[in-house]
Image (cartoon, rainbow, N blue to C red):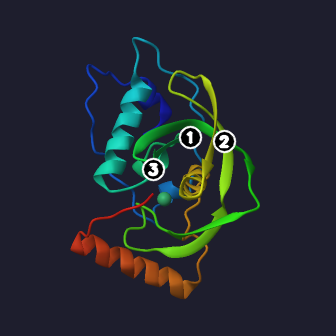
Amino acid sequence: MDLDAIYDREIDELVPHELAILVWPDERLTKPCQDITRFDTEDDKFLEQMVLDMTFTMLQNQGIGLAAPQVSIMANVIVLLVENKPVVLINPKIKSVSDKEYEWEEGCLSVPGYYEKRKRPNSVIVEFKDIFGNDREAEFIGLWSFALQHEMDHLRGKCFVDDLSKLKTSRVKKKIEKTLKRKLPRRKG
Ligand code: ZN
């Protein structure tokens, strides 16, 4: 979905929709996203509808984070589940990261069934906008710092399994195939 389609969407009332999640490797997951340039007003709630759909999709799939390109929306928008509360970040930019690292079994809703231990900075300060275009800044720590950085990678067209060896890549593909076949519950961002 391009941004014009989102901006021009007719919304009668806010009802959540589950969106289809792209499965890696999908070409659309390799494209950098665009910033949001129009924001919600009292009468026009197209972004609220979009993030409602994204949040619903994340929760339905037991995720803790979702980036807009994972649901074919090529916009710099992330939803994160922080201590069971959804947080929406529009046009996020990382201001600083810590030297200290956090280790976690990285996973992705677009890479169902595959997990790999990785390290990322333990804390991150990020600037972003809310759905009305107001400037915000927040610090994310530990798991949420990790998850936010994972989602930021999606916005620039990167997925955590992009640069694996040939052997590992074929293992990832097999794992995804098997997981989708079994329709196991998926989790993580
Ligand atoms: Zn992901």
The answer to which of marks 3 and 2 sits earlier in the sequence is 3
Residue 51 disc label: none
The residue drawn where x is 33% and y is 57% is 62
- Is the residue marked 3 within 8 Å of ligand 1, measured from its CB? yes
Extreme residue in the bottom direction: 167
Which residue was labeled with disc 1?
76
Q: Is residue 136 above or below residue 160?
A: above
Of residues 72 and 103, the one nearer the viewer is 103
Q: Quadrant of the N terminus?
A: top left
Q: Is residue 178 above or below residue 78?
A: below
Specify few, some or many for label 2: CA neighbours under 10 Å numbering under 14, 14-19, or 20 or more: many
Of residues 83 and 112, the one nearer the viewer is 83
The residue drawn where x is 26% and y is 70% is 184
Residue 66 disc label: 3
| Front: mark 3 or 1 | 3
What kind of element bears circle 2?
strand
Q: Position of residue 133 (x, y in %)?
A: 57, 23
The residue drawn where x is 46% and y is 74% is 115
Q: Amino acid at mark 3?
A: Leu
The answer to which of marks 1 and 2 sits earlier in the sequence is 1
Q: Amino acid at mark 2?
A: Val
Judge from the rendering whether residue 58 lies leftward or rightward of residue 165; answer left or right: left
